[in-house]
Image: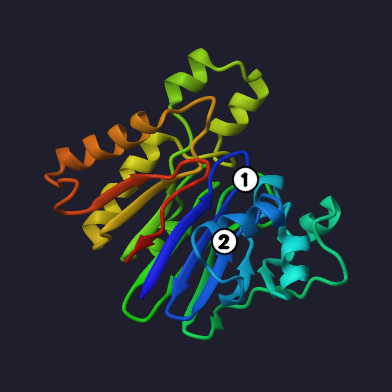
């Protein structure tokens, strides 16, 4: 049985749990080790199932809990060389962390893992796909633009955790953010808007994706109903109906349910 759960999602912290039979991995650990452990216990998940942590990039909301959680539970950590450099600079690594630079493909028991480059303001950020045998899961957040590499990597996935960070009008007209921060978010090194997410969702459903989880929503510049409505409306224009052709959900900052695939 395969499972996926956004334990935490958004600028306050990110952590995705993926399980295939008796093996599980985490994507990112952007909150404290204590909070991750509590979130797992609340869902009756045995921490010993987790065999690896895959880090997308070094920002605090993705990597701040890696050092303590990985060393306490003796879990190896995988990331690009650039991400490890950034994590070391921010104090998110120590000599006790079992740090492994990503190769082209990594096998964690019955889960095959590949990574793909993403466009974000970091040293070397990436997203991941997880081959569970009869299903493929993709985690694709924190990117300003969907490149051909990203599109090719996540195409055909059974389920995708996809960034739907901000509503462009809310960010431009109502946000208290500075001009420089707005420009960063809207840039190709920033975050994916609801509109850009919706366009990619159409491609995904056409490629065979059945489940999309909208993630990393801004609490300042987005609303869950806006994110889901933007994606669902564009899919509806293409003749695709939520609940029949696909299942769409929105990840809350925390307390999300486990999705059984």
Judge left or right: residue 103 versus residue 115. Answer: right
- Of residue 193 and residue 217, the one placed in the foreground of this image is 217
Circle 2 crowding by C-alpha within 10 Å: few under 14, some 14–19, many from 20: few
Circle 1 crowding by C-alpha within 10 Å: few under 14, some 14–19, many from 20: many
For the question of whether residue 13 can be seen, the reply is: yes
Location of residue 117 in the rendering, given as x and y in whole percent from the top left corner: 56, 60
Q: Residue most toward the right? A: 95
Q: In this view, does 8 lie above or below 95?
A: above
Q: Which residue is drawn at 51% across and 42% down?
A: 216
Count of marks, rendered view: 2
Location of residue 238 in the rendering, given as x and y in whole percent from the top left corner: 15, 43
Q: Which residue is drawn at 34% across and 30% down?
A: 225
Which quadrant: the N terminus?
bottom left
Q: Name the residue under label 1.
A: 13
Q: Mark 2 points at which residue?
A: 41
Q: How far apart are marks 2 and 1 (CA)?
A: 18 Å
Coloration mode: rainbow
Location of residue 167 in the rendering, given as x and y in whole percent from the top left corner: 43, 27
Residue 180: which numbered mark, if any? none
**SS for callout 1:** loop
**SS for callout 2:** helix
Q: Which of marks 2 and 1 is nearer the N terminus?
A: 1
Q: Which residue is drawn at 53% across and 39% down?
A: 191
For the question of whether residue 153 can be seen, the reply is: no
Q: Residue at x 24, y 55 (%)?
A: 205
Q: In this view, does 120 lie above or below 57?
A: above
Location of residue 161 in the rendering, given as x and y in whole percent from the top left corner: 42, 54
Q: Which of marks 2 and 1 is in front?
A: 2
Q: In which quarter of the image is residue 107?
A: bottom right
């Amino acid at each position: 049985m395969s499972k996926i759960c956004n334990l935490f999602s958004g600028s306050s912290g990110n952590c995705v749990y993926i399980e295939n039979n008796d093996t599980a991995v985490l994507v990112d650990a952007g909150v404290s080790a204590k909070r991750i452990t509590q979130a797992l216990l609340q869902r009756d998940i045995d921490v010993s199932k987790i065999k690896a942590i895959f880090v997308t990039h070094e920002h605090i909301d993705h990597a701040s809990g890696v050092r303590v959680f990985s060393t306490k539970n003796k879990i190896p950590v995988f990331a690009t060389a650039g991400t490890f450099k950034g994590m070391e600079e921010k104090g998110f690594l120590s000599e006790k962390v079992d740090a492994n630079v990503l190769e082209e493909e990594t096998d964690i028991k019955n889960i095959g893992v590949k990574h793909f480059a993403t466009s974000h303001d970091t040293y070397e950020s990436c997203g991941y796909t997880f081959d569970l045998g009869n299903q493929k899961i993709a985690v694709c957040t924190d990117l300003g633009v969907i490149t051909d590499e990203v599109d090719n990597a996540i195409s055909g996935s059974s389920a995708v955790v996809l960034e739907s960070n901000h509503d462009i009008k809310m960010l431009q007209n109502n946000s208290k953010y500075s001009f420089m921060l707005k420009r960063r978010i809207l840039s190709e090194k920033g975050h994916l808007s609801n509109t850009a997410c919706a366009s990619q969702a159409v491609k995904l459903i056409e490629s065979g994706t059945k489940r999309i989880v909208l993630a990393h929503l801004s609490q300042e510049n987005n609303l869950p109903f806006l994110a889901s409505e933007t994606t669902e409306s564009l899919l509806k224009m293409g003749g695709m109906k939520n609940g029949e052709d696909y299942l769409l959900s929105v990840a809350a900052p925390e307390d999300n349910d486990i999705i059984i695939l």
